[in-house]
Amino acid sequence: MKLITATPWGVYSVWWRHFQVYCSTWLVNCLPPISEPIVYLLAFGYGLTPLIGDVEYLGQMVPYSRFLAPGMIAIGVLFQSFFEGAYSSFIRLNFQKTWQALLTAPLSYTDVFLGDWFWAATKGAIAGTLTGLVAVVVNLYDLSSLVLSLPLIGLGSLLFGAFGLLVAGAVNKVDQVNVPIFLVIIPMFTLCGTYFPRDTLPPLLARFASFLPLASLVDLLRWPLGLPSWWPLLLLWLIGWTAVMARLAALRIYPRLFS
Amino acid sequence: MSDGLSLTAYDLWKTYGNEAVVQGISFTLAPGEIVGLLGPNGAGKTTTVGMLFGTVIPTRGFVQFGPWQLPGQGQMARAQMGIVTQEDNLDPDFTVFKNLTHFAHHYRITGAAARQRAGELLALVNLEHRADAQVDDLSGGMKRRLVLARALLNEPRIVFLDEPTTGLDPDARQDFWRLVQHLKAKGCGILLTTHYMDEAQRLCDRLLLLQAGKVIDEGTPTDLVARVIGREVAEVEGVDPDRLKTLAANYGAWYRAFGSGHLVTLPSDKAEAVWSQIEAHHPSRLLRRPANLEDVFLRLTGSVLE
């Protein structure tokens, strides 16, 4: 793939197109990231907290609902950015031919790719932030902590948005998107310390779960409860995953547009 | 669209594996000129157009458009190009009007300027009454006109029309042709690919006939017909082919089996003699008509345009 310079206007213009589509049905689009965490926090927070009480996290006991809230933020980031990158970009690439239309304008491949990627990340960031606000409202996450966590939400959204785009570029049929969902997304969603500390898993499984990038994001988002001493490595791990995913995604999509 | 820019293709080749789908195509498109790439499906027309605006990377050769060389400077070149691709890739998420205003944003045309330009173009393509319609509710002809309007947002110096009227009814095709002629009158260079001979004959100043990725002949439609076929052709049915072959050979005419009958050219200096000889065989059907590009293609390639 030949490196083509992106222009700030080009990237913004592609992102803006997706944002306009989102705005045209903004109420419907905002519903899932608000309703989903409310339902989960109510169900797990109120339902399981009396049964579980406190959980041990980094050597201290914390209320289960406060443990759960950062996990919910990470899940919001994961689902919204991944699904936008995978399903919506696949549809824009293969059914609506939006990418092909954009490339008849004075936009480079890099403009279109970055615009799509940043939009997927924006959707993840919106979901993560709205989930965080719900957690703030029910007093499970401090507002100041949420503000300080925004860069982490952004980084996680870029990572899973890039993974979604890689899937969109790798599959030939929309149903095949289910394969990475069941092989990667669901295991991450359940095992990475979102709903329970990974220490309770068998050692081998816990190690595997810690390797997955959502684990690093959840651990970092849980910083108000404490951070492991190697947290800078977690941050680097996330940045590394993001760079690799974005590069692979760009390489997979390019041949679908240029021959 | 007054300051024209020329486009020149230099020895374009495109190979996929061992298959060469475009082989050494070179030509120049001048401002205000309509050049047609005429050929059957699979002749390499769309691949050639892709190389001209930068989505197909040539295996060899390059394109010079004004000061820009493609594929390397495709992004800058496309700022002065209008591109109507073969497939409709309008945005189903937006109305007709917003398809234009949102696409104008990519050219840095925004706000009131974008709305004004969209209004002008919808009026040009006779779609102003459908401005608030959803794209999916448009007919095929309306969609093609809207794609053309979108390609004109930036007042391009050159427009690529890749099979723009495929699948349209005769009225819609006439509407589209009128728009193409309007663009030419404004000084816009136009590259048209088509497999409709009437479209090529009606619109194009110059034609490149393509077969298997190669230009097999080129010229104005009138010159091509006159040079390759002559002025008139007889369509004959119900006559022994061997007799017709002999007759054609005797008069230096071209003969070919075609459908359930035969074609025989009527050489200008011996047209009446050949015609009366054919009539003397009492064919079951006999038609004398002007020669056309279909005949040219049939003679040059042995196949019809499909």
Image (cartoon, coloured by chain):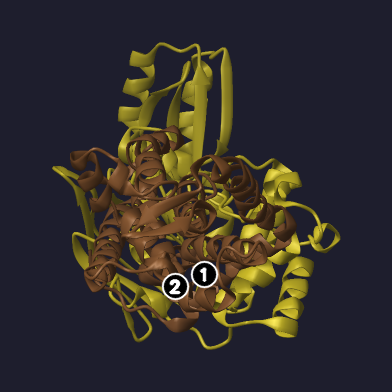
Chain colours: A brown, B yellow
* Residue A125 seen in render: yes
In the picture, the quarter occupied by the N terminus of chain B is bottom right
Viewer-nearest residue: B269 or B108 = B108
Q: Is residue B247 above or below residue B159?
A: above
x and y percent of residue A10 in the render? 47, 77
For disc 2, the neighbor class at 10 Å (few under 14, some 14 to 19, many from 20) is: many
Tags 1 and 2 in contact by the CB under 8 Å rule? Answer: yes
The type of residue carrying mark 1 is Val
Which of the two discs, 1 and 2, labels the residue nearer the N terminus? 1
For disc 1, the neighbor class at 10 Å (few under 14, some 14 to 19, many from 20) is: many
For label 2, the residue is A107
The type of residue carrying mark 2 is Leu
x and y percent of residue B79 in the render? 48, 78
Q: Nearer the viewer, mark 1 or mark 2?
A: 1
Tell whether B247 sits left or right of A36. Answer: left
Viewer-nearest residue: A120 or A218 = A218
* Residue in the picture at 48% in, 38% down: B271
Tell whether B287 sits left or right of B214. Answer: right
Q: Is residue A5 above or below residue B174?
A: below
Asked which secondary structure carries label 1, the reply is: helix
How much space separates mark 1 and mark 2, taking CA atoms? 9 Å
Residue at far right of view: B129
For label 1, the residue is A14
Tell which subunit mark 1 falls on: A
The circle drawn on residue B250 is none
Tell whether B36 sits left or right of A251. Answer: right
* The quarter of the displayed image where residue A48 is located: top right
x and y percent of residue B54 in the render? 35, 66
Asked which secondary structure carries label 2, the reply is: loop
* Residue in the picture at 58% in, 17% down: B285
Q: Is residue A177 above or below residue A120?
A: above
